[in-house]
Image (cartoon, rainbow, N blue to C red):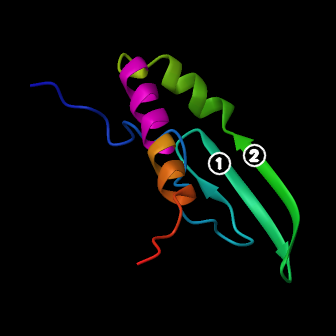
Amino acid sequence: MNTKPECYGKMFPPVVETAHNKPVAGKVFGYEVDYRGLVVHKREAMVDRDAWQHCLECPDFNGCYQLSTATMLMQLAVKTAPQSLY
């Protein structure tokens, strides 16, 4: 039986909803958007290099990276889809 680690496909954080003033993280990559009132004061992308090294050594790396990337792209597509007029 081929079991995948719990972190499989979760290198990137969810991007559908932007969290205000708190870090959002996947296993390797993360971000934080700092708002002051209605204005974005700071945007920061983060990389956990130790987690990245761990991922590089994982035998499931290629499939995990592909699933992580595809998931993030689908979330971005949903996030940027136009609102229905109906």
> Relative to residue 76, is residue 46 drawn left or right?
right
SS at badge 1:
strand
Give the numbered dot on residue 86. none
Magenta stretch: includes residue 7 = no
Q: Amino acid at mark 1?
A: Gly
Magenta stretch? 62-72
Give the numbered dot on residue 45. 2
Magenta stretch: includes residue 71 = yes
Would you place residue 40 above or below residue 60 in this image?
below
* Residues at marks 1 and 2, CA–CA distance in whole angstroms: 6 Å
Q: Main secondary structure of the magenta part?
A: helix
Which residue occupies 76% across, 63% down? 33
**Do tag 1 and tag 2 residues touch (Cβ < 8 Å)?**
yes
Would you place residue 84 above or below residue 16 in this image?
below
Chain-order first, disc 1 or disc 2: 1
Give the numbered dot on residue 30. 1
Would you place residue 4 above or below residue 25 in this image?
above
SS at badge 2:
strand
- Residue at the far front: name it: 85
Which residue occupies 57% across, 56% down? 80
- Residue at the far left: name it: 1
Crowding at mark 1 (Cα within 10 Å: few <14, some 14-19, many 20+): some
In the rendering, at what x and y percent does residue 63 appear?
36, 23
Q: Amino acid at mark 2?
A: Ala
| Rendered-image quadrant of the C terminus | bottom left
In the rendering, at what x and y percent does residue 22 appear?
70, 68
Tell which of 8 and 19 is nearer to you: 19
Which residue occupies 42% across, 18% down? 62
In the rendering, at what x and y percent does residue 57 appear?
48, 16
Tell which of 75 and 41 is nearer to you: 75
> Relative to residue 37, is residue 1 drawn left or right?
left
Which residue occupies 9% across, 25% down? 1
